[in-house]
Structures are given as C-alpha cells and as structure tokens.
Amino acid sequence: MRIVSFEQEQRADGFMEDRRYEHDVLVAITRMRTLPSGKQITLFLDARGNLLSENHSYGMLQLSLERKFQGGAMESETYIGKRRLITRAAYEKARAMYPDMPAADTTMPDLASELAQWVRAEARKKKPKRETDPEAARKLDAFCEGLLQGQDVEDAFAWLVQGKSTLGEMSAPASRRFLLALRDWGCPAVQACEVERDHDLPKNSSHLVITLPQEAEARKKVFKRVGKIAKEQGFDPYADDGQKFLYAKMD
C-alpha cells in the first residue's frame, strides 16, 4: 500500500511550496504563486529541486504558456488559448492584452503550427482529386440559360448605382458588397432573374445567374462565396465543372 503525505510552506519569494512524499521519501515539489495581475505561475520540480516544467497562465486556460525542461535546458514550449492549443503567432497576438506573460521563445519548435501543417498535408494525401463532370456543367448552363430567357431579368451590376435594390434576404448594403466582390473577381456579368418590382422599379431578386470568369483563382473565390450562401440556405454548393454560368439562390 502506497503511503502518501504532503508538506506545505510559504517561501520568501512569494511561492507556496507543496512537497509530496511517498513512504516518507520526497518525490516531487510544486510551487505556485498568484501575482496581483491575476497571473498564476506554477513550477514543477523533482525531488532534487531540478525544474521539470514551468507554467504561466491567466484564468481557466484563457491564455497559458508551458515550458518543459530536461537536464536544466528547455526542450519545448506550448501555448494554450481559450482551452485549445494555439500557434506561437496567435499567442504573441493574445499576449498584447497580458503584458506580464513571457515572450515566446522563437528557438523552440512551434508545435501547434507544425501540427496544423501535418494535418493539412495528411488531408491533401487522403482527399482524391475530384474529376470534373461535363454533364453536370451542361445541365447547370442549360438551367441558367432558361432563367435568362425568362421575364423580369435585370443587369444586377446596374443595381450598384441604383441604390436600394436587394438580393434575397440580404440588406441593400450587403447586396451591394456581394455584387462588388463578384465584379472585382472578374465576373463579366451578373443577371438578376424573376425580379420583384415596386412601381416598375427593380426591388428584389432571389435568383442570380453569374457569368463566371475564366481565371482559375477568381473562379475559386466565386464558387467559395456562392457555396457559402448555398450552405446557409441548406443546399449543397455547386462544384466547378467548367460551366459558363453559376446559379445563386439568395433565399
């Protein structure tokens, strides 16, 4: 049966020291101190007083830095923010609000950053490259051409200077920002279909036909933004199958 006992002592340097004994033999030492700022410093030492790890933290792991030592030399440094592992850059950004937190040691490996890079690399390995679907592209282009041949079709880019026309449930400013982004990404045209009118003036459209740009990076931006809208509406986003048009349902 293991017999465990503890001793506690207030040190002159402000640390409260807890000593752990097993069968009356000292096995571990913990020193803790809380500063007026609220920062807590915790030191873990072996029975000989050699530092094993050092922790500086605020709150319930709101921001924390842990250093581990081996043979008197630091071997790793870990950063925690809001209860999760964060990168060195994120720690340094958060540290601006806690000036008595130690600066990160740039000579140490950035474990969170390395882990994130590894996860991304593994994801790229496991995710097979998607093949384009020409038939899906043809069907979507045909659907969009049908909308364009219907009634109540307006040049949505012209709405940028008309003021208060809206897209689906978007506000007028949000609608304007969305259209400006599409124009900036090189979309040659955006048509608002099945436009609802107020006294013969365009008022709202929930159906957009976007003429896609040719440049690959620009297309990615358009598909990503329109895909986000689709997910918000409960629909699966369209993939880039080389189509000419992209349909966006705005509500």
Image (cartoon, helix red, strand yellow):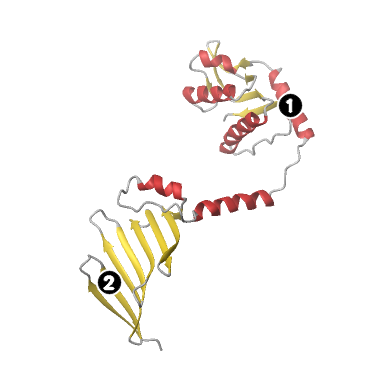
The residue that label 2 is drawn on is 17
SS at mark 1 in the image = helix
Q: Is residue 157 left or right of residue 30?
A: right
SS at mark 2 in the image = strand
Q: Position of residue 150 (x, y in %)?
A: 69, 18
- Label placed on residue 211: none
In front of the other: 163 or 41: 41
In front of the other: 176 or 115: 115
Q: Is residue 101 left or right of residue 149?
A: left
Lower position in the chain sequence, tag 2 or tag 1? 2
Neighbours of disc 2 within 10 Å: few (<14), some (14-19), many (20+): some
Q: Position of residue 134 (x, y in %)?
A: 78, 33
Q: Residue at x 43, y 55 (%)?
A: 79
- Label placed on residue 141: 1
Q: Position of residue 208 (x, y in %)?
A: 62, 24
Q: Residue at x 72, y 44 (%)?
A: 129
Name which residue type carries label 1: Asp
The N terminus sits in image quarter: bottom left
